Structure formats: structure tokens, C-alpha cells
């Protein structure tokens, strides 16, 4: 059965969990380009409700599942989703590195990089399973003394960051053809996939950065049940600007 578009008249019918009248949670498939906040601004225009939040941001270069809380009663309960495990699909570009750990940064090609075998990759991936400490990347929204790390990074500053506890439940190798490696990863909330990709590249001794990143699951909530902006009427462009006008 074809999904009906979400409009200013019927958006309430698409909530997967209602908390009150005109309040509940909506699954959105964020495309590459707009920020998570751009999507929220767009939904504010659709719903005519200002109190809207999300349960975990996605970088502009990333796509995938956003859980959106609409209305004050729902935003008060959004923490029930924030700490849930996440599942991502990420495409790594091997043989290079990026200062942002992704395709948006300054790319440095490693000309003398050795091409790892499938066996070598599988062996390295096993080292990242289970509980571990992870240092947040400089290009992240995490704050230190009131300043976002990416703001400091853009000024050329590198500051000491405290590692935090994360857990990687599994890393599935989906496809490998040099220099591209596609993985599916289940991890705890707060895991920086970009940082994990960079660490994998270091252990492989060839470098790596995240070429593409998609969040496919948050807890039991699946991207397959989410609404893309194309299903939200009026139809927006994929350009980020269309979400903030």
C-alpha cells in the first residue's frame, strides 16, 4: 500500500507514537545535504508547531533515520530514544585520510598505501568489537568549556579531549573492492562512526575516511518505515536551502 504524503492537514496520522493531541513522534529519512535542524525547521512549517526536536543528529553528509518529536509533551519524552543503540551502513574510502574523517574535509591521498587483503581487514575489524574508549573527533559538535570542537578545529586548534565509553556490537563486512569498503555497524549511542573509520584506517596502515554514511536503525525503529522529504508535501528539493527558507 502506497504511503500518503505528510501534509499540514494529515501529519498526525503518520505518528508512530502519540503522547497527546497534536503531539507524538515521526520517523524521517534525512537525505544527504540538509542538517538535522533544517529538517526540523521544515516540519515546523508543515505542522505549524514550534516545539520540535530530534533524538540524535546526523551530519549534513550523512543520510538516514531521524526520530522527530513534535509538540511539547513529546519533546519532554525524547530521552527514551536518545540512548538507544544505532545501526549504520558506512562506505569507507581506503588509501587516504581526511581532517574531518569524512568526505567533506581536506583529503590527503596516501600514495604508498598497501592494499590490504580481505583476511587482513576482517582481522582488524575484530579488534574494534566490544566495550572501548573513543576520543571525540575535533570536527564534532561536542563542547569543551562552552565551545564546540568544530569551531576550534576551523581555527586550526587541536585540544585535548577526554575519551568516552562506547560499545560496538558487530561490524559486518558487506562489500570490499579497493579502495572502497562497505560496513554495517551496530553500536551504542554516542559512537562517532567517522572516528571509528579513521581508527580502522590507521590499523590497516593505509588510511580511511567515511565516503558515505547512512543510519538505518535506532533501537527497534527502522529506516524502512521512515518518510523521506519527497513524501512530505509540498515536495522540497534535496538542496539544504529548501529546508530553511
Image (spheres, rainbow, N blue to C red):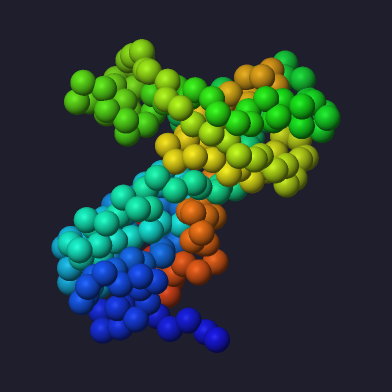
Q: Position of residue 19 (x, y in %)?
A: 26, 69
**Image quarter (top left, top right, bottom left or bottom right) of the N terminus:** bottom right
* Residue 172, quarter of picture: top right
Q: Is residue 49 left or right of residue 128?
A: left
* Residue 210, quarter of picture: top right
**Image quarter (top left, top right, bottom left or bottom right) of the C terminus:** bottom left
The residue at 56%/47% (across/down) is 88
Task: Answer above or below: position of 73 versus 145.
Answer: below
Task: Answer above or below: position of 104 versus 23.
Answer: above
The answer to whether any part of residue 135 appears in the image is yes
The residue at 32%/34% (across/down) is 141
Task: Answer above or below: position of 85 versus 94.
Answer: below
Of residues 213 and 125, the one drawn nearer to the viewer in this rendering: 125
Q: How many marks?
A: 0
Q: Position of residue 74 (x, y in %)?
A: 25, 62
The residue at 31%/50% (across/down) is 79
Q: Is residue 49 left or right of residue 98?
A: left
Q: Is residue 223 left or right of residue 92?
A: left
The residue at 78%/40% (across/down) is 177
Amino acid at each position: 500500500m502506497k504511503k500518503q504524503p505528510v501534509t499540514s492537514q494529515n501529519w498526525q496520522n503518520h505518528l508512530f507514537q502519540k503522547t497527546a493531541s497534536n503531539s507524538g513522534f515521526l520517523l524521517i529519512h534525512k537525505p544527504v545535504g540538509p542538517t538535522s535542524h533544517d529538517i526540523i525547521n521544515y516540519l515546523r512549517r508543515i505542522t505549524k508547531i514550534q516545539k520540535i526536536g530530534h533524538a540524535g543528529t546526523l551530519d549534513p553528509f550523512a543520510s538516514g533515520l531521524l526520530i522527530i518529536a513534535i509538540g511539547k509533551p513529546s519533546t519532554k519524552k525524547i530521552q527514551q530514544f536518545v540512548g538507544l543503540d544505532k545501526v549504520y551502513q558506512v562506505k569507507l574510502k581506503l588509501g587516504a585520510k581526511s581532517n574531518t574523517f569524512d568526505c567533506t574535509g581536506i583529503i590527503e591521498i596516501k600514495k604508498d598505501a598497501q592494499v590490504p587483503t580481505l583476511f587482513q581487514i576482517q582481522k582488524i575489524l575484530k579488534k574494534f568489537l566490544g566495550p572501548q574508549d573513543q576520543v571525540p573527533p575535533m570536527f564534532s559538535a561536542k563542547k569543551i568549556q562552552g565551545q564546540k570542537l568544530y569551531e576550534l578545529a576551523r581555527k586550526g586548534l587541536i585540544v585535548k579531549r577526554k575519551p568516552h565509553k562506547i560499545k560496538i556490537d558487530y561490524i559486518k563486512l558487506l562489500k570490499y573492492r579497493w579502495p572502497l569498503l562497505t560496513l554495517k555497524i551496530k553500536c551504542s549511542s554516542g559512537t562517532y562512526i567517522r572516528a571509528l573509520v579513521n581508527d580502522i584506517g590507521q590499523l590497516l596502515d593505509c588510511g580511511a575516511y567515511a565516503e558515505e554514511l547512512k543510519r538505518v536503525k535506532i533501537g527497534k525503529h527502522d529506516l524502512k518505515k521512515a518518510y523521506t522529504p519527497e513524501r512530505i508535501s509540498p515536495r522540497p528539493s534535496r538542496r539544504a536551502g529548501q529546508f530553511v527558507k
